[in-house]
Amino acid sequence: MVSGSGARDRAPCCEAKSPQSADDVFIAGDVKDADMSVKLQKISAEGHVDPLIYKGTTEALEAGTGKGASPPAHWHVFWAAGAANLIALAAGCVLCWTSPSISKFSGPNATFELTDSEAAWVGSLTPLGAAVGPIPAGILADKLGRKPTMLGDSVLLFISWALIAFANSPAMLYAARFIAGLATGCIFAVLPMYIGEIAVDSVRSTLGSMMQLSLTVGFMVPFALGPYVSVTWLAIASGIVPVLFAAAFFSMPESPSVLLMRGDTVEASDALQWLRGQDRTSIMPELRKLEDEAQEAMKRKKPLLQSFMQIFATRGNIKAFVFGCGLLFFQQFSGINAVLFYAQSIFKKTGSSLAPEICTIIIGLVQIVASAGTLLLTSRFSMKFLLIFSGLGMAVAHALLGYFFHLLVTDQDVSSVGALPVGSLVFYIIVYCFGFGPLPWAVMGEVFAADVKAISSSVCASFCWLLGFLVTQFFGLLLNVLGDDITFWGLGGCCVLASLFTLLLPNTRGKSLQEIQEMLNR
């Protein structure tokens, strides 16, 4: 292979100065031997990748290899997604820690006691931190990359568990729970980005729904261990999870899209070859496509404040932002917190003799099984269909729960419908996990354009956690003002509206990220 100037193989390509045309770019037959991974990563004075260098690098990589067909899903991408989702499992440990732990800060065996007000702050500081966390996460995900940001989250989680393990005052618990919330908010913003960018079109929805499964497995750590071990030992067990994540994820590749936006074309090629389980020949068409998308995104890239305004700059960006925030709004107002809050009392009102901790374990197992089923469903049905089905199913469950509580409020005999509340509860959890639990995050991983993906995901995740904080704080007041029956019927109405809203979503099943952007901009 020779350069445009007729040099021989393995000529000292690194001596070439900034080329004036693509023909001046030389890559030896073996790119790694030529060590072009650094020499061709040149950035223009405006901060954009030099299009001649950028284009020439990929053309050189492609030279002598030809073009191959788009590769199918390879087990490597499932391995990378599984390793990444261990951080979601760690977030699940955070979110359900208070359930078995808060009660242990009272009584003679407590290391120190929490007042009711202090316990409320320990519980609410996590969603508050999670509402703040996505903003710096979006900035870091763009500056450092998706992978370093998630590895940094694991450090924050480990610190939070260490603080809890050695806590000797409410202030240490406050700090621990706020730090854990920051990390959790970062996870919910960055993990869907990473999964959406490494996945092939045919399995993007399936991989996107893995986050909910990982969360529910994480829920089981405090549910199963919390009632039977001390706060310290639960913190130690939970702190092991982010360590396992860091060990598993450290060797995984960065998102090829991020590498291309940095100009690291050779490294992006290596990452894509591993993720697809293919050689350079097979991944070259996809690499060229990703390169074009990254180059276009870099041209549109703006500083932080301008990046936020870019969300509203095009029809496609606006629609994607509305879809993301809308789905997360209906996720929070679907009543998941209300149902879980009432779970143990529902079991008691049916006359069940099961202990409360056993009830929570049963609920956790139902969530795991239903979330695992979602992985199979997303491979057969579109996310749009599953979201509509989920919304209508939750509405039915709320209507039945509202009817049961109405019978109680009006002092009617409920012996003939004793199985109704438990059946409605289980059905609700199943249909929630089929749709509005995991899929809003999977949709977010697909619909945002590359140049606004980080800021859009961050704002949507902050919006979600702010809603979660408000719902948690004011749900009790709502019950007192409206009553149990009206509250659940109102939540059912929200679920019907959620299904109607979902009708506006485009059907993205099997579509590439570029095709989705074209659909949104119509």
Image: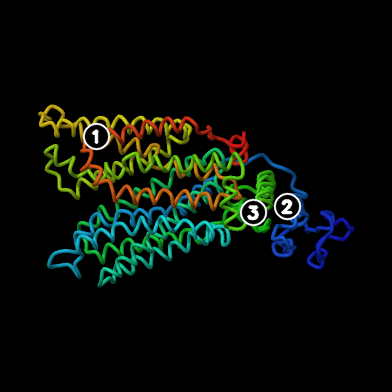
The image position of residue 488, as x and y in percent, is 26, 36
The image position of residue 106, as x and y in percent, is 16, 64
* Res 40 → quadrant: bottom right
Of 283 and 279, the residue lying toward us: 283
Element type where label 3 sits in the image: loop
* Res 233 → quadrant: bottom left
Kind of residue at disc 3: Lys
Kind of residue at disc 2: Thr
Q: Residues within 10 Å of mark 2 (few under 14, many from 20)?
A: some
Kind of residue at disc 1: Ile
**Number of the label disc, if any, that sits on residue 301:** 3
Please state which of the two labelled residues, at mark 3 or mark 1, is closer to the viewer. 1
Q: What is the distance, in whole Å, between disc 3 and disc 1 at their CAs?
A: 48 Å
Work out which quarter of the rendered image holds the N terminus and state it: bottom right
**Number of the label disc, if any, that sits on residue 486:** 1
Of 231 and 490, the residue lying toward us: 490
User: Going from the N terminus, do you reach mark 3 or mark 1 first?
Assistant: 3
User: Going from the N terminus, do you reach mark 2 or mark 3 first?
Assistant: 2
